[in-house]
Amino acid sequence: MKKLLVVLLSLTLIFAFTGCTSSNNGAAEDIEIKTQEVVTSNTNDNDDNISNTENAVENANEKDYDFSSYENDIRNITKSVNNAKTSTNASENHEQFYALKKQVDAVDDELDKLDDEFEYAYQMKEISFEIYKARERAIEKLEDELELVEEALENKYGIDD
């Protein structure tokens, strides 16, 4: 758990400092390379993150919710962002960016809806507070990973949406 928090904090700091560079072409290429490396390293660490998420959820309840479909979606989007190639044609870049952004937003919307469902279940006393908090933490971790992918996408295409 602490390792995950340290990794996420480190990645956040990297993104914060790369956003402060000048806007010349060399710096933009440097940001793209750094961003791609961060997303790639995040992808490699996903197995550890998934295990941590699953362990937290399993500790709360053996028959708890399965987040694997969301984890797979985020992993696939991360791969798509890593494999995306920018073009000299601005129109193509915008199309690619918004196609990938649409995938990110769809998963984010699903996670928000799921979080609302869990909150409602807790309020209706269908699940305990411990289960609700474990599920909420798992969703927050997934949203953090998704946010890193979105930031990498924005940096790769130079579009701040």
Image (tube, rainbow, N blue to C red):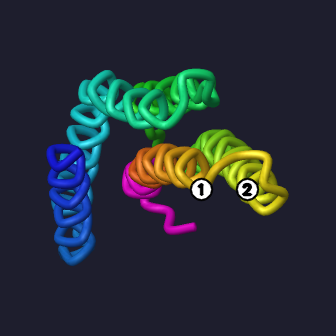
Q: Amino acid at mark 2?
A: Tyr
Say which residue label 1 marks. 129
Query: Where, by quadrant of the figure, is residue 6 drawn?
Result: bottom left
Residue at 49% in and 44% down: 138
Q: Nearer the viewer, residue 91 or 51?
A: 51
Comparing 137 with 38, the one in front is: 137
Instruction: Give x and y (percent) for residue 122.
Output: 73, 56
Residue beneath the point at 34% across and 25% down = 51
Task: Answer above or below: position of 150 versus 84.
Answer: below
Q: Give me the residue at 24% from left, 71% from top.
A: 16
Tell me which secondary structure the magenta stretch mostly adopts: helix
Q: Quadrant of the N terminus?
A: top left
**How many labels, in total?**
2
Mark 2 and mark 1: Cα distance apart in space: 7 Å
Q: Which mark is residue 122?
A: 2
Q: Left or right? Give the position of 155 relative to 109.
A: left
Q: Is residue 158 magenta?
A: yes
**Stretch in magenta:** 149-161
Q: Amino acid at mark 1?
A: Phe
